Structure formats: C-alpha cells, structure tokens
Amino acid sequence: MQIYRKSSIQPLIMGFFLLFALSGCAAAVGALSTVGSGVAGGAEYFVSTPVARTVSYDYDRVKKALLVTLCKMVIDVEKVKKSESGEKILATADDLVVVIKLKKITSELTRIEIKAGEGIVKRDEATATEIVQRTTKIAEKLVT
C-alpha cells in the first residue's frame, strides 16, 4: 500500500478543478467545493456568463441609446471594433473595465452582451445589468 502525501495530491486536485472550471461546468465546480474550500466558489464566479439581452429595436437605435447611457453613467468609451454582425466596445470607469458586444440579429432585433469587472476574475454583474436596463429605457424614448 502506497501512502500519498498531501503535496502529491494537490496538483491532481487542481488539475481536475481546472478541467471542470475551463469546460464551463458550474455543477462540477460546485461539487468541488468540499475539496478546495473557497476556491470552487471563486471558480464558479470566474466562469459566470455575461449579462445579455435581446431588444426589439434596430441596431442604430440601440447603439445610440447605449452611448447615451455610458455618457450619463460617466463610463468612457476607449475603443470600438467592428465585426461581421455588430461591434465590440471597450469602455472604462475608474478601475472598472466594461466590454460590450452589440449584434444585429434582424432589422428590428439587437442583442446586447456586457461583461463588467476589475480584471478577469472580479465580475460586476450589477453594473452590467444596470447598463442593459438603462440602455433599453433610453431606446424606448429615443426619437429617430
């Protein structure tokens, strides 16, 4: 019978943890909470999805509403990258980084996807949700 030291098992545990965390399996990450105390909870937060919503307005209207929202919230647009079906907007507010994806689904449907946070691990879902809600409200009232 071979006796395993704690130090030889830790890399194995971390390997399984990374396998489940990077595959996006939140249930498996939750199951690992007994193994790694607070590590599994942090991993579940790490693999969380962005705040997303599809709205019934054309792409240009949603983009204008989004820019008004960011201005009112004092969030600065740093960079805009165009893609095949939309744009990716990088914005900042103090230490907060906001990544927004706008995607034209149809002529009257636009998808907004937002990730906000400080770095890779620390997500701010409340701020992302607030941006989506305010953008939708402004789009309703916007005269085009």
Image: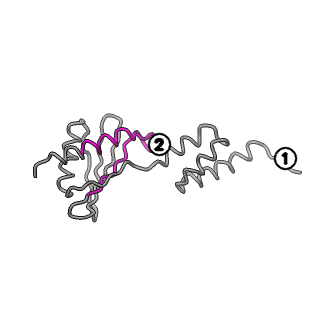
* Image point (30%, 48%), residue name: 90
The amino acid at mark 2 is Val
Q: Is residue 83 above or below residue 117?
A: below
Q: Which residues are magenta?
A: 110-135
Task: Give the side of residue 135 with respect to residue 141, left or right.
Answer: right
Q: Position of residue 8 (x, y in %)?
A: 74, 47
Residue that numbered label 1 is attached to? 3
* Image point (73%, 47%), residue name: 9
Q: Position of residue 114 (x, y in %)?
A: 34, 48
Q: Secondary structure at mark 2?
A: loop
Residue furthest out toward the left: 144
Residue furthest out toward the right: 1
Q: Say whether residue 59 is magenta.
A: no
Within 10 angstroms of label 2, few (less than 14), some, or many (20 or more) residues?
some
The amino acid at mark 1 is Ile
Q: Cα distance, mark 1 to mark 2?
A: 36 Å
Q: Position of residue 70 (x, y in %)?
A: 23, 41
Within 10 angstroms of label 1, few (less than 14), some, or many (20 or more) residues?
few
Instruction: Give the numbered dot on residue 121.
Output: 2
Q: Say whether residue 113 is magenta.
A: yes
In this view, the residue in front, 137 or 119, is: 137
* Image point (26%, 61%), residue name: 104
Q: Position of residue 65 (x, y in %)?
A: 19, 47
Task: Give the side of residue 24 with respect to residue 130, left or right.
Answer: right
In this view, the residue in front, 2 or 103, is: 103
Q: Secondary structure at mark 1?
A: loop
Give the image's coloring scheme.
one colour
* Image point (21%, 52%), residue name: 62
Q: Is residue 56 above or below residue 93?
A: below
